[in-house]
Amino acid sequence: MRLPTKILLLITPMVVIPILTIGIAAYRLIETSDVSRAAGETASLAQQMEMRLQGVVVAARANLELFAQSSLLHRYVFAEDEEVRYVLLQPSLLRQFTSYQQAYPEYFEIRLKNVDGEEEARASMRPHGAAMGSVQDGPFLERLRANPDPVHHEFMRDPHTRELILMVGKRLTFREPYLDPVTAPLLDRGYLIMHVTLGPMITQASRALRESTGYFITDGDGSVVFGGSLLEDRNALPPEQFRPLLKSVAERHAVSLQLAGQAAVAHGLELDDDFLLFAVHSMAATHRASRLLGIQVILVTLAAVLVATGLLFAVLHYLLVGPLNRLSLAARAIGSGDLDHRIDVASQDEVGLLADTFRDMCDNLKESNRQVSFLAYHDSLTGLHNRSMFREFVRHAIARARRNGERLALLFIDIDDFKKINDSVGHPAGDELLTRFADRLADCLREEDFVSRSNQARLGGDEFLVMLSGVKTPLDAGKVAERIVRPFDGPVRLADQEFLITASIGISVFPEDGADGDTLIRNADTAMYHAKRLGKGDYQFFSQELNAAILERVQMEARLRPALERGEFVLHYQPQVDLRSGELVGLEALIRWDQPDVGLVPPNEFIPLAEETGLIMPLGLWVVETVCAQIAEWRARGLTPVPIAFNVSAAQINRPGLAEGIAAAMHAHQVEPEMLELELTETAVMHAPDQAIATIAAVAQLGLRISLDDFGTGYSSLSHLRRFAINQLKIDRSFVKDIGSDPDDAAIVAGVIALAHSLGLGVIAEGVEDAEQRAFLLARGCELGQGYYFGRPEPALAIENLLYRKQRASGDRFS
Amino acid sequence: MHAMPIIVVTVISGLLLGATHAAAQEPPELVVLNWPNYLDPELVERFEQQHGAKIREVYFEGDDQRDEMLVNSDGAGYDVVLVSGNMLQTYVRSGWLEPMTEKQVPNLVHVSPRWRTAFAAADGFAAPYTWGTLGIGYREDLVPEPIESWMQIFRPDPMLRGRIAMLSHNRDLVGMALMALGHSSNTQDEHELLQAEDLLLAQRPHVRTYGYIGLTPDSAMVSGEIAASMMFNGDALMLQEFEPRIRFIVPREGGNLWVDYFAVMSRSPRKDIAFAFVDFLNEPENAAQAAQFVYYATTNESARRLLPEDFMADPVIHPSPETLERSEFFEPLPPRITRRYNSITANVVR
């Protein structure tokens, strides 16, 4: 998580610093503005209070003048008799004073002094105020007397309470009565003095102020006369506090100072000669507010930082880190080969672009990998596998073939004179030839229907390899090679020239020619060179025997074709006897090839070839024809023929026409169907396509007996027996041979006999060679037998004798 | 030139004559400054008929008010004034009183000398009228227990608070406060005066009024709004006529003894009629009638014999010797002390 950290470390200061700077600046600004505001406020407050006090002064003076007008006061002052004054006049006068005090409670003391300064009457709102001793107003009276203005006021400390009061005094000067109003002299008859209390008024005014503002009044020495809410009355301010206050008064501006333990701003002015009035604003609350602001700023900053950090984190993570991580994971995955790793980044921005590039890169990698892979294993020109791939295939095929006991054939193909052609037409044309050859290879191999899989490779240059699996006989591989040696049907046009293209092929066979791929390839290569030496356009097996076999087969095939026309085939017949009576009950027709220069060739040597070449059909029909003719001939000779069985191959029954041929032959020679019997091998019937079923059904329809030959050698489903209209089972000779010694064979034979009987089929045993076998079979209930014990296959002539004998001694038994 | 003064004199004479004529045709009016309900109207009427004069009664509520009224007019405007004995001297010094002897008021002879000399300046300037006590009048059904002490109204039970009336005259107020505290009502002791001031100031919240309640059926004590008041003895009896449950007591600390006098004002323009009125009042029958009307003890010796037994026997009207023993007359005080009393009173009665 380094990237976000880095970015945050970078951005956080950028967020924090401005906010903090602004906050601090704001704080400072507020602080100074607070101070200056406080200064202005205190100045104006001081002035307001001054004005109020002035107002009080003015009012008090005016009121005092008014009070002094009272006629009662006048009379009192002029009353000579003390008793009259005190007893009669004073109560009323006092009542008058108290009525003034009811109207103006702040005039808490009103005193009347005589001209000598002695107290005459006192109305005091103070508790026990009336009882207090007379006040020595000496100095005040002095000043009152001295003042040209009859009304004189002073701010002072109350003599009793030491509170700040306004003392107002009026010289009671009256014109001497009863004399000329103009010329009569003025007489001082006394002084009317009023104490005006200021504290409550100031306090009241203070109440209207904001909290933390207030007034206080000191005398010239710094002693607090009125402390308000901030200071204690009667305390003296320490010089360090008083000095700035004095400065404020002198310079007419507010000062900041520490007052009563708090920061404050104060503005002072002179109340009169003796007293100083101050309006003060405690900065504590303001500072508190500022501090609160400061804290709020800090909190806001913190919150902003946290929120911003959080957001940034989240955003970075979502937009960058997450995708980057995913991309890095993807890169790692791709690096370690997982090219299908999904890149889960799909944003529309640069990161998304990077992801797209990644995906493209991945796809390109995949593509390259594929190509490399392909190139690693394929020939770039033809698209066929290359050597290394082919070797892999060979290895796998060998393993599989070994497991299944199958054969493999490897074809090593070399185009004849390729170098010469390449030189003559140039490389591009040469490459074209190679490509076309490769295509043709594929075509040639597709025609082969018993080769289940083949693999082709180009080794380089003009060499190709083909591997055939599921090869039954090596000769099948030869058939494939046959097609390849002359791949093109005519000349090939290459760069305005025509060439006849041939290939030389070497074939090696697994497992005979090698147990591993390299050996097989090497041997195939050798065989190929052999083929080249023998002449172009040919194929050679590695195994000489195979080559010989091929040769022989080719030769035989060449001789087989005309053999039928030349009448080289002959039928021999082997007797089929009743095991009990020994009577001849039938014959099996067996075909022989009487080759000139070679002799009799048994059917197992040429029938397969006949089946492959398609000769089996005419051959088969010839057999039917010959058998029918033979029966007709014997009949003509006056012999009683017995039914003759003839073999039919799978090839014959898989092709249409068999039933028709048989029918034609029967018709031609007037032979009844009961005289003919079809012998099918179990294996032929095993894989019976519909055609076979139809053919057999048609033959059965004709009325021929059908016999299942070599029964027990193939694993046919017993249901087959029901499908086909079988009449008889022929026990294979391999079971009969060891009947005496092998209990399993004996059991099988017995079983087959029982099976046949239970199904209502006849049973005949093949290959009966001795009496013991005969006895066994007889004991088990087998009706018929065939074998050397009863007679070998003989030509027709020999059989004739048998027929004669049979006819002569009907009931003759073979012992 | 000479014609002007002649014209003036003529005009003035004519006016004077007219005035005299007018005066002669109009019955002369006697202005009597007195407490309300303190003169039997019958007597007034009789005098008016007998002397062909008209009496106009001007009332004051308290001695202090009377003093103020006289101060304000400097003694003018009134012919006969009812003065409490202790003020006579001061009035004389003010020059307000016309000298009075048997010469002007022959019936003075019926007045016992005792009363004629009870106060300084009484003899020679005024004729005694009635005498009595100052105590507490109260509604016996509106007090938690019968009143026996001044303290019961100076430090009243919650039941009484706000239903107390006090006099506003300085000697009465301060004096009775002093007596409540066990001091003399004539004390000059500052300490005692301070105590009295405190007592009075403390009492203030409970006092309904510093004024004398009326003596008519719509008196506050009749209605019950005032349950107890500083009161003159006879006034309580007068109120009893309207509300029988009113009682009077001179508290055990003692009360004030007073004597009222009738004086003729020196600035009275009808002195002769004034003297005739005072003389009339001192006729024994008239004095007896007057006393019975106001329920006060008469100062007229001859009238005493004419008063009924029960009147004479009423302890309220004629208090017992013990009561008399513990009560005081107001004595004159030095100016300084008077000032003190004045200040206290001024402080209390605002």
Image: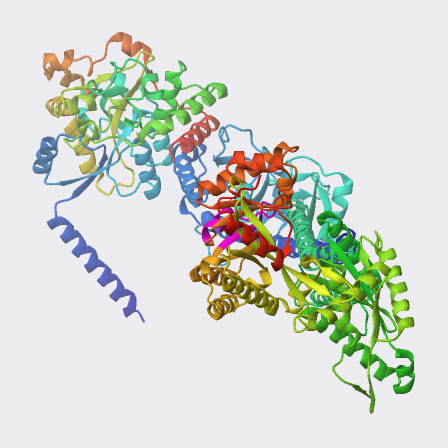
Hey, which residue is sitting farthest top in the picture? B322
Point out the residue furthest to the front here. Answer: A808
Within the image, what quadrant is residue A518 found in? bottom right
Determine the residue positioned at 53% across, 33% down. Answer: A779
Residue A263: % across, % down = 70, 44
Residue A521 makes an appearance in the image = no
Residue at the (72%, 60%) spot, across then down: A600
B74 relative to A689, above or below: above
Q: Is residue B342 left or right of residue A343?
A: left
**As drawn, A528 above or below A813:** below
Q: Quadrant of the C terminus of chain A?
A: top right
Residue B24: x percent and y percent?
Answer: 13, 49
From the top left corner, tell me how far across and down residue A131 is, in percent.
50, 28
In the image, A395 versus B347, the foreground residue is A395
Look at the image and give the residue range highlighted in magenta.
A706-723
User: Is residue A296 or residue A470 the one in the foreground?
Assistant: A470
Depth check, front residue: A406 or A582: A582
Q: Quadrant of residue A546?
A: bottom right
B107 up-or-down from A107: above or below:
above
**Image quadrant where residue B178 sits:** top left
Note whether residue A773 is visible. yes
Q: Is residue A653 left or right of residue A430?
A: left
Asked if residue A774 lies left or right of residue B27, the reply is right
Locate residue A785, reporting x and y percent.
56, 44
Q: Nearer the viewer, residue A303 or A1?
A: A1
Figure check: A351 above or below B323: below
